[in-house]
Image (cartoon, helix red, strand yellow):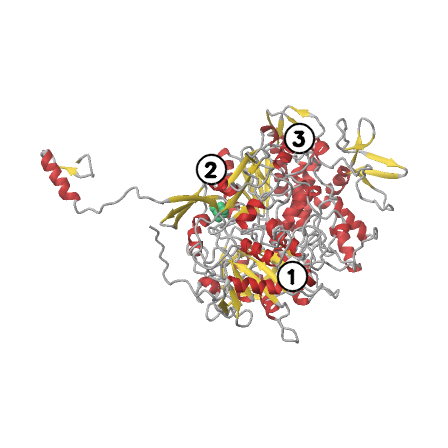
Amino acid sequence: MARFCRRAGVPARAGMHPQQEEAERSRMTQHQPAIDLSPRTSDEIRKTTCYMCACRCGINVHMKDGKVAYIEGNRDHPVNQGVLCAKGSSGIMQVNAPSRLRAPLKRVGPRGSGQFEEISWEEALTLATDWLAPIRAEAPEKLAFFTGRDQSQSFTSFWAQAFGTPNYAAHGGFCSVNMAAGGIYTMGGAFWEFGQPDWDHAKLFMLFGVAEDHDSNPIKMGLGKLKARGAKVIGVNPIRSGYNAVADEWIGITPGTDGLFILSLVHCLLKAGKIDLEYLTWYTDAPCLVNCDESSDEYGLILRDEEGRALVWDRIERRPRCYDKPDVCPDLGGTWVNEGIEHRSVFQFMVERYLSEDYAPEAVAERCGIPAGKIRAIANELARVAFEEAFEIQQEWTDFRGKKHKVMKGRPVAMHAMRGISAHANGFQTCRALHTLQILLGTVEVPGGFRFKPPYPKPVEAHPTPHCKSQPGHPLDGPHLGFVRGPEHLALKEDGTPARIDKAFSWENPMSAHGLMHMVISNAHAGDPYKIDTLFMYMANMSWNSSMNTKGVMEMLTDKGEDGEYLIPRIIYSDAYSSEMVAYADLVLPDTTYLERHDCISLLDRPICEADGAADAIRWPVVEPDRDVRGFQSVLCDLGARLGLPGFVNEDGSQKYADYGDYITNHIRRPGIGPLFGWRKGEDGSEQPGRGAPNPEQLQRYIDNGGFHLQHVPDAARYYKPWNMDYQDWAVKMGFYDVPHPYLFTLYCEPMRKFQLAAEGHGERQPPEHLRARIKATMDPLPIWWDTVEENRGAEFPVHALTQRPMAMYHSWGSQNAWLRQIHGRNPLYVPTKIWEENGFAEGDWARVTSPHGEIVVPVAHMAALNENTVWTWNAIGKRKGAWALEEDAPEATKGFLLNHLIHELLPEKGDGLRWSNSDPITGQAAWFDLRVRIEKAPAPDPAESQPAFGPIASPVGHGPKVNRQKVG
Ligand code: SF4
């Protein structure tokens, strides 16, 4: 064996003199390269918040020579605790992307051509002001202002409200409003930003319809914890990829049948008596009494006292009593007959409905694509873990009735769901069904179950109602979006027609809590319900992957009337990148990238809290833009001042907020409450969380703390939040509510019953005749399921077609990213074995895919782990030639494709003379996943490009370099 010298690993020769050894070593090492084994990685670390997807992890941005050198996860951050995904670390290529817009643009060619000239900001803002000021003075509703996946909705809605237009919303209507609204209406919050599984205690975790991108790092970290503890994970999804690929059990359900499957589980649990009666009695509306007199104006409504509080049957005093009395003893089986009118408990209605054999596993198995035995086995497993593995945490707490509890009881079954179950026309009721299942098992807000993240839970009553009254020269009469309690809150004009361009909160979709962004362009094009003047959009790629009927939308944006003018007269668009939508704007306001601006991840908006802590965060300019671009929110501060909008000007008419950073620091939404809740100023001048005056040092405090502020939930407040007075009092102190707001979970959604009553002929506001039957059928106060196949001509189009977003790319955001493009530069259509073999497909083949609306020709790939009647592909990989600074022969533009071409915003004709909207009839959520298609083998197109192929658009930023070299320092 060779003897080694002490240094440099040079083998010594036996018998060599030390001086000879040294000389030999010197001879051998003098020609070796000098390697710095511990190079200086950065001059400085700047801590901010990632925006490569909507999870908003904390990141450490390493700077070298003034440039971003690399990005790592922030170990102290509550969201990711140091974990960073591929997208997050690729942020360095986002901030250097060739597709970044460089300066304001004014259209010089026809719309859609991509021909622009660069103009100054002064010219751009003067032009925008000249367009918008007359609208505000004469008819504010002629501005439609819609934002996409930005995270500043409390700010942009404030701007729109000050402008006075009723036409504002963000992207929720085409994303997952069913999930959000279903959760709020049922239990005061839903998944992701609203709540999370109790990763530390759950023993059984069920995921429904969750693609890989949603709640990305937190779910990956949580799954790691579950797996380490041996907890079981069940994934319910037609496609086995991402989280479903690592699940212990995969249920490849037929798309659109989740609600039926869930209600079958409810059936099994009720039949077996495996439900949490104690939980239902004390924390839900299950014992509340419902009017059963069909002739009454109040038929189906909850019995209430004079102050409007729900009444339950008290089993001791044998009379109806208010649900929150300290000594009340609610009876789940209570019935009260008064003056001939019978009232029965919600629980009785539920039992009657869900014990029906219509929900028996054998009755639903074929439709759901899940064997009856499997449904029963899952119901048994849920019951076993919830009740036989129940446990206690030794923590005292006090409920809203004043009762002290010595322990917190745990039921270790947690669930999570997302867009896969909600983007269907039956999605709202399906989401409600899922929450009903959770509540029956008693697994919400208990140890081991699903937990809310502050500032949630927030019942419907703690949210605003929608407002729509606009007057020339005045702000709107209140916030645009909210939660209707009944027909009285619909956004209707005096003549009963919709007040909003997207027809949100109209009889067509009464509970459209997030608006219907996907209907804005088609309604504006049709002038239905009225014409608009200016379409103003932010971060919404509506001429491509964010619209149904993509080709049709391009035509709507470019169509002209008989007078030769565009039917949508003006389009202002803001984006950081040269997306497909840029080509359709008349004026482009270039935004910064996420590392170049101030942002506020606010508790007033879509927060980043954890179940055990309230948190908010900022972004700040860790690098200065090297182009003539401005953060969109700062531009709105400027534009708001130029337009003289209240809230954006001082008393002397001068600009109130110099930029968005100034707004974040100094804006006051309610007394003591601003966009950020950390380091506010107390009356004595000290800094404090929650309520307080603006603090000029606040942003710096956030920067010094790593970009976020975190307040831990007190131990006694960690669970049972809706009913826990320790939590309620803490929430008031932090400013989430102004007064404590305990409430009951809502198994029976009374606002829905009020809409049914209107459809049955009761009340002043009633729906038009053609909508009565649909409202009666769909707005059932207890969750129901209906099939959407027939209305999508399922008999002629036998295959379901879906999209999912990949883990490594979020929407279009990664398309210009040199690293991420290498992971997903093209997308085949994945075909299950049965369809693959029926069609004789082989690798490299192409298929023609036809829907009731259109046809595409695309490459196919075989995937066995897929529901046998479903095909799918990745979302938004396909790109239009000329967009995103990509070369025209880029794989995204030739082999990539969109399913959007097959989907229309209206359903196929049914022969009733009407074209019904392709959305949930309750919330208006776009029913992307109800798509039905036919598939057949097709010859490869010549050239071999996915069809339809659209002509190239001119790129206002040129194309990226042929070779991309990135070296910092
Ligand atoms: S999960 Fe999203 S926010 Fe977190 S590091 Fe990845 S891209 Fe960034």
Residue designated by label 2: 76
Q: Looking at the image, can residue 388 be seen? A: yes
Residue designated by label 3: 725
Of the image marks 1 and 3, the number of the one nearer the N terminus: 1
- Residue neighbourhood size for the residue with mark 3, other residues' Cα within 10 Å, grouped as few (<14), some (14–19), many (≥20): many
Q: Looking at the image, can residue 547 be seen? A: no
Q: Is mark 3 within 8 Å of ligand 1?
A: no
Q: Is residue 683 left or right of residue 64?
A: right
533 and 483: which is toward the camera: 533
How far, Cα to Cα, is label 1 from label 2? 43 Å
**Label 2 residue SS:** loop
Give x and y (percent) for residue 883: 49, 64
| Amino acid beneath label 1 | Leu
How far, Cα to Cα, is label 1 from label 3? 44 Å
**Label 3 residue SS:** helix
Q: Is residue 14 left or right of residue 391?
A: left
Give x and y (percent) for residue 180: 64, 47
Of the image marks 1 and 2, the number of the one nearer the N terminus: 2
How far, Cα to Cα, is label 3 from label 2? 30 Å
Q: Is residue 737 above or below residue 551?
A: above
Give x and y (percent) for residue 916: 70, 61
The residue mark sitting in front, 1 or 3, is: 1
- Residue neighbourhood size for the residue with mark 1, other residues' Cα within 10 Å, grouped as few (<14), some (14–19), many (≥20): many
Of the image marks 3 and 2, the number of the one nearer the N terminus: 2
